[in-house]
Image (cartoon, grey):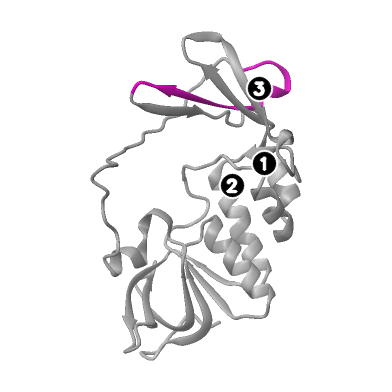
Amino acid sequence: MDGATGEAGVPVDVLVIGGGPAGTTAATFLARRGWTVTLLEKAAHPRFHIGESLLPMNLPILQRLGVLEQVKAIGVHKPGADFPMRGDSDSVNVFRFDRALDPQFGYAYWVKRAEFDELLFANAVASGVDARQQVKVERIDFAGDGRPARVHARDADGHALAFRPRYLVDASGRDTFLGNTLKLKKKNPAHQSAAIFSHFRGVTRRAGEEAGNITVERFAHGWMWLIRCAGT
């Protein structure tokens, strides 16, 4: 698809905002069904992102996408989760993923999101998605019926772009583009929670295969989890 657009905008079946796992997955499956799909990612891959711990239910999706072996190559094997008993550092309840009711996959992976997202983005391009990086959506014009009629964006060189999608998918993650645009977000006064993260070296891990387990532990003011990263 040509990068230049007129005031009316380029017609497209589906426009996807966001080039992370959700956006690339939706775009890939839609493109494989014959839809014309344009995906707009505001950053450039590879880029840092948190949220690296996959679950077994992710793996059938990756298999359908055709990238499971690629994910295996970049991931850390994760067979389950440890739940230490409070007040007893030597007692740990272990939940193995292969003990689930229907364990199609009895394991999962930790992945570095910079590599994982770049892999999925490339797969979307290979599947026929018009996937563009460093293109930021700025605003949406809505029709009288409330549906998105025109989406305005801008590329890294400052060029204005416009699209006329039949359908719009907001996969912008924490940006919540549509939620902010339509002012749908509301704070829950009874749930003013917060989270922090960091990376550590030299952490003692379990022996053998269980070294890849995540650790979930409660404390006085909430809970925490520890996830083994590649190379540690």
The boundaries of the magenta stretch are: 205-220
The amino acid type found where label 2 is placed reads Glu
Q: Nearer the viewer, mark 3 or mark 2?
A: 3
Q: Which residue is mark 2?
A: 115
- Measuring from the top left, give residue 43's x and y in whole percent: 43, 58
Amino acid beneath label 3: Ala
Q: Residue at x 73, y 33 (%)?
A: 99
Q: Secondary structure at mark 1?
A: helix
For image coordinates 68% across by 46% down, the residue present is 71
Q: Are marks 1 and 2 in contact (CB under 8 Å)?
A: yes
Say what secondary structure mark 2 lies in.
helix
Residue that extends furthest to the left in the rendered view of this protein: 189
- Split into 4 quadrants, where in the image is the C terminus? top right
Q: Which mark is residue 35?
A: none
Residue 232 seen: no
> Which residue is label 3 attached to?
211
| Residue in the foreground of this view, choosing between 176 and 98 | 98
- The spot of residue 9 in percent (x, y) is 42, 87
Q: Which residue is mark 1?
A: 74
- Within 10 Å of disc 3 (Cα), the crowding (few <14, some 14-19, many 20+) is some
